[in-house]
Image (cartoon, rainbow, N blue to C red):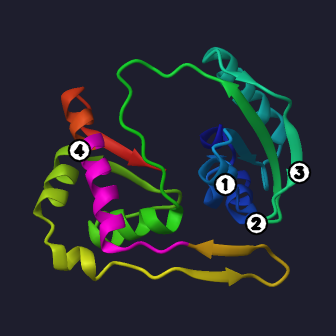
C-alpha cells in the first residue's frame, strides 16, 4: 500500500513517524507479558481506515482469530495506533526460527557489528550466505566492543523508555539465533533476507 501512495503521501507517512515505528509491529507487552497484540501505526496515512482494512483482510486470509480493533494514542510515540489482540493463529509448517529485536539492537547487530548497510525501516537484500559467513568469522573481541550497558531515557512529555542493554553473551545468543535463520533460509532455497 505504501508503494501505491503518491510521493508527497509517502513523505507524510515518514514525517508522521509510522514508517520509523514499523507500521505493523508486535506491541511491547508481547515481550514482557506474552500478550499477542499487533500495533498498526497510522500517523501520516491519507486514509488510515484502508490500511486497517488491509490488515484485517490478511488476518482473515491467514485464518487468524482476533479481538476488536482498538484505536488509541501511542504512549511511546504519541501518534495514532490501532491495537489488534491476536487470539489464535496457525503457525506455517517449516517456518524459520523466530527472533525479535528492538530497533536499537537490530542496528547494533546488523549495522554496527556485521556491517550491513541499513535503510529506513530495516535492512534488505542481506545475502543469507554472507550473513552466515560473517557470524562464523566474528572474533570474541569484536563482539565485546559492541556490548551495551542498560539505560533509561525520557522525551519531554513522552513515555519513559528503558533500554536493557546487551552483554557480550546476549549478543552471542542472538547471533546464534540469526545463524539458525540464515541456515534455514539456505536450506529452503532463499538467497536473501530482510530485517524489519
Q: Residues within 10 Å of mark 3 (few under 14, many from 20)?
A: few
* Distance from Cα at disc 4 to Cα at disc 3: 38 Å
**Quadrant the N terminus occupies:** top right
**Which of the two residues, 70 or 24, is positioned nearer the viewer here?**
70
Residue denoted by label 2: 76
- Residue at horizontal 43%, vertical 67%? 107
* Distance from Cα at disc 2 to Cα at disc 4: 33 Å
Q: Residues within 10 Å of mark 1 (few under 14, many from 20)?
A: some
Asked which secondary structure carries label 2, the reply is loop
Dots 2 and 4: beta carbons under 8 Å? Answer: no
Q: Earlier in the sequence, mark 4 or mark 3?
A: 3
Residue denoted by label 3: 72
**Which of the two residues, 185 or 144, is positioned nearer the viewer here?**
144
x, y percent for residue 101: 48, 56
Dots 1 and 4: beta carbons under 8 Å? Answer: no
Asked which secondary structure carries label 1, the reply is helix
**Left or right of 44, for residue 194:** left
Q: Earlier in the sequence, mark 1 or mark 2?
A: 1
Asked which secondary structure carries label 3, the reply is strand
Amino acid at each position: 500500500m505504501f508503494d501505491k501512495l503518491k510521493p508527497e503521501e509517502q513523505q507524510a507517512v515518514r514525517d508522521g513517524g509510522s514508517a520509523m515505528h514499523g507500521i505493523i509491529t508486535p506491541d511491547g507487552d508481547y515481550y514482557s507479558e506474552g500478550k499477542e497484540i499487533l500495533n498498526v501505526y497510522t500517523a501520516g496515512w491519507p486514509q488510515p481506515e484502508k490500511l486497517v482494512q488491509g490488515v484485517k483482510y490478511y488476518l482473515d486470509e491467514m485464518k487468524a482469530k482476533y479481538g476488536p480493533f482498538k484505536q488509541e494514542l501511542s504512549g511511546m510515540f504519541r501518534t495514532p495506533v490501532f491495537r489488534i489482540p491476536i487470539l489464535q493463529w496457525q503457525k506455517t509448517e517449516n517456518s524459520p526460527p523466530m527472533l525479535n529485536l528492538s530497533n536499537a539492537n537490530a542496528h547494533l547487530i546488523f549495522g554496527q557489528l556485521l556491517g550491513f548497510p541499513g535503510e529506513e525501516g530495516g535492512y534488505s537484500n542481506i545475502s543469507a550466505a554472507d550473513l552466515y559467513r560473517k557470524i562464523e568469522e566474528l572474533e570474541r573481541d569484536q563482539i565485546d566492543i559492541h556490548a551495551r550497558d542498560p539505560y533509561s531515557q525520557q522525551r519531554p512529555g513522552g513515555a519513559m523508555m528503558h533500554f536493557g542493554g546487551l552483554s557480550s553473551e546476549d549478543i552471542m545468543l542472538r547471533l546464534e539465533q540469526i545463524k539458525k535463520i540464515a541456515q534455514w533460509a539456505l536450506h529452503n532455497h532463499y538467497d536473501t533476507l530482510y530485517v524489519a
